[in-house]
Amino acid sequence: MYIEHHEAQALIQLIQAAQTIIIHRHVRPDPDAIGSQLGLKSLIESTFPDKRVLAAGTTTQGLKWIGSMDKVTAADYQGALVIVCDTANQPRIDGDHYDKGATLVKIDHHPPVDDYGQLQIVHPIASSTCEIIAEISRHLGDQLPMQDQAARLLYTGMVSDTARFLYESTTSRTLEVAAWLKQYDFSSFEISDRFMRLSFEEAKFQGHIFETMSINEAGVAWVTISQEDIKAFGISEEQTQIAVTLPGRIEGVLSWVIFVQQEGNGDHYRCRIRSKGPVINGIAANHDGGGHPMASGANAHSLAERQAIVEELTQAVLAYRQEIEQED
């Protein structure tokens, strides 16, 4: 177990001492962000029913099936314990006033780039922040016991961040934690089915992605999604997430990037970068982003910058292939 006894005890002592606890996560949340946020909230509420526990941030329509946020005001932060889940750096925290509480805690599985918070529980070895929250509960036992609702939320985040346990980030420990959570009363089938399900519009959009994808000889793929594409297929920007894993299914592709044009600024593209070998978070950091070695996000503000990202990925893939050949 990678959870240190001292950090788990420090967290539970802060929770026990606080009357109001406010939990944040990152902007544009994914299921791991919401699952860890609401899973931790559920654990605290069931263990300490007299405490006030709030989930801060904007509600994401496509993920309302996981859970919803609370209304949080500036006054709520007075004397509060604030916990931020799944957020590597402060500019990405969703919600204001997170730094106005009595104590700030960071719980995350991203590589550390911003050492904020009086207590930091950061373990990049974990597949997800949901896995870390589950491990904290396992470590603390009766001090913060697992229950059905929290298990469902945490399992949801783990399934999402590992692509149903397919990614390299899935360790034997990940599977052990998932098996432990499955002992509780929730339907793992319903969770997996939810991630597999597509609307007809989304299915047609996936076809468009394959039709417009470019792949170079090195094995780098890229796709550009415009605001016109989003409107033409009747989907939201949030739904473009379904394109992220598609290039990786093509034989020979080792790294790829999805460029999504941002509404109101035609030159600004969000970049979702993925890899099956070459480390790409350094490339993301070069372009106003960051993340995991195999999954990162960035921003491009011109055609030239988008072309530069593709070129940097190409060089990373070529270097990776050369390294593999030398090892053989």
Image (cartoon, rainbow, N blue to C red):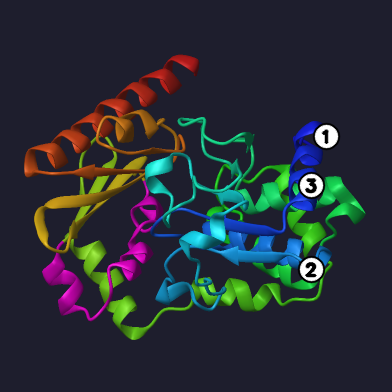
Magenta part of the protein: which range? 226-251
Task: Identify the residue at horizontal 78%, vertical 40% (top origin).
Answer: 8
Judging by the rendered image, the residue that carries numbered circle 1 is: 5
188 inside magenta stretch = no
Q: Residue furthest right?
A: 142
Quarter of the image for residue 118 reads top right
What is the distance, in whole Å, between disc 1 and disc 3 at their CAs? Answer: 11 Å
Q: Which mark is residue 50?
A: 2
- Within-10-Å neighbours for mark 3: few <14, some 14–19, many 20+: some
Q: Are the residues tagged 2 and 1 within 8 Å (C-beta)?
A: no
Q: Earlier in the sequence, mark 1 or mark 3?
A: 1
Quarter of the image for residue 204 reads bottom left
Task: Identify the residue at horizontal 38%, vertical 25% (top origin).
Answer: 320
In the foreground, 206 or 125: 125
Task: Identify the residue at horizontal 33%, vertical 53% (top origin).
Answer: 247
Q: Which mark is residue 12?
A: 3
The amino acid marked with disc number 1 is His
Give the label, 1 or 3, closer to the camera.
3
- Within-10-Å neighbours for mark 1: few <14, some 14–19, many 20+: few
SS type, badge 3 = helix
